[in-house]
Image (cartoon, grey):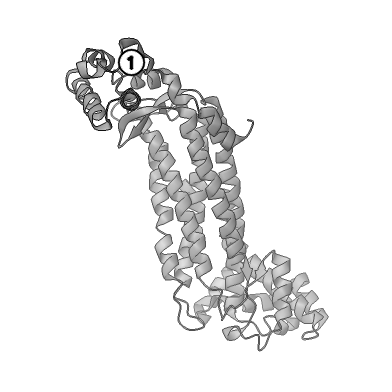
Amino acid sequence: MIPRYSRPEMTAIWEPETRFRIWLEIEAHACDAQADLGVIPKEAARAVWERGNFEIARIDAIEQETKHDVIAFLTNVAEYVGDEARFIHQGMTSSDVLDTCLSVQLTRAADILRDDIQSLLAALKRRALEHRNTLCIGRSHGIHAEPTTFGLKLAGYYVEWQRNLERLEAARREIATCAISGAVGTYANVDPAVERHVAAKLGLEVEPVSTQVIPRDRHAMFFATLGVIASSVERLATEIRHLQRTEVREAEEFFSPGQKGSSAMPHKRNPILTENLTGLARTVRAAVVPALENVALWHERDISHSSVERMIGPDATVTLDFALARLAGVVDKMVVYPDAMLRNLEGLRGLIFSQRVLLALTQAGMSREDAYQAVQRNAMKVWEAGKSFLDELKADPDVSKHMDAASLESLFDLAYHTKHVDTVFDRVFGGA
């Protein structure tokens, strides 16, 4: 988590000030519930709200001696609250505070990421509609295949990001749980009503069985979802990087006035943002395996997961937040070159219509095997000698035996390949 790849709102979630503030709220809400149950005096609960406070430097200093962060925090809070502080943390264990706080932090992070994805979706929709009918070549294995439209390409990314939004919302629901169940999760010294109260106040659900920690399969699913989202970031970034290659140059990142591409070569316009996004995606995915390994804790609790989560929680969410904002900006300002798309579309002198010719020959009476051989041998002349595919087909006696020149020419029609674009757009965007 470094400033270069961080945004303030997400970073603030993981600051010590935020973490300790959430801890204090958890303890104060728990005191309210304990007071309602008659376990502690109501005056004590009020004192926590009125005088409860902390100082980060003081907590750090106490922890140097106690070697326990929650005890250090409670000791510092007690210095502010006074005598009533003896009623704080009644029947609770450290994990009740730590795990519930982490749930709050991850749900807040998910809310920011949700807004990020919605911004990206808006940019993708706008650009897809803009280029609904902008013809370009579709590629398989990196090789020219058949015509498509740039809008259709972007529409595919749009629905992928809709799925990512749904995945994130599901992951948020799964992680938004509260545990105030005491040592080994038996509620022996804290009434379940306390947990229900704290959960309601923090916008969480009660963890059904928390042992002494919230089960880490929830966290594994959360970080796995972030990993999937990061992979989608990389997929779109990689597409733009390929399209910006000099030999292709169908689209490119916006190059702002005064921007420099190379310290050595003044002519360079490099895809630095999408290359950066590829690297950031790798960083987010690096959190997935440690999160999965955190699932297998010993018995009712150990802390082997703790150090991991202190790192991957901030790093993965802050990095993904930055990446999503950057990707939305790239899509929004992406420069598109329709003329270059058309030029590339025509670069193989008609080979992109080979499937249509193949099918037409079978319809005209040729066996599929013979039709394939006829189309392929003429296609190879185009690859190897730069011939015109249509001219070669017209001159082939096996082909002309089944189709005349006019029939062949009718097959070389770009509009044929885009006749269902509106069908797909209606499916994705409705009447937009």
Residue 257 makes an appearance in the image: no
Q: Residue at x 65, y 77 (%)?
A: 180
Residue 101 makes an appearance in the image: yes
Question: What residue would you read off at disc 1?
Answer: 408
Foreground residue among 146 and 163: 146
Residue 40 versus residue 312 in the image, above or below: below
Q: Is residue 329 left or right of residue 176?
A: left
Instruction: Locate residue 207, reporting x and y percent.
Output: 62, 73
Name the secondary structure under disc 1.
helix
Outermost residue toward the front? 365
Residue 226 versus residue 405 in the image, above or below: below
Instruction: Locate residue 241, reporting x and y percent.
Output: 37, 35
Q: How many marks?
A: 1
Outermost residue toward the top? 406
Foreground residue among 392 and 259: 392
Q: Residue at x 46, y 28 (%)?
A: 150
Outermost residue toward the left? 384
Q: Residue at x 58, y 72 (%)?
A: 98
Instruction: Locate residue 421, reporting x and y percent.
Output: 51, 28
Q: Is residue 50 left or right of residue 323?
A: right
Image quarter of residue 351: top left
Residue 4 versus residue 346 in the image, above or below: below
Outermost residue toward the bottom? 188
Instruction: Locate residue 304, reporting x and y percent.
Output: 44, 75
Foreground residue among 369 and 130: 369
Three-letter code for the amino acid on which mark 1 is drawn: Leu
- Quadrant in the picture for the C terminus: top right
Image quarter of residue 80: bottom right
Foreground residue among 29 and 295: 295
For mark 1, does the 10 Å Cα neighbourhood hold few (<14), some (14 to 19), or many (20 or more) residues?
many
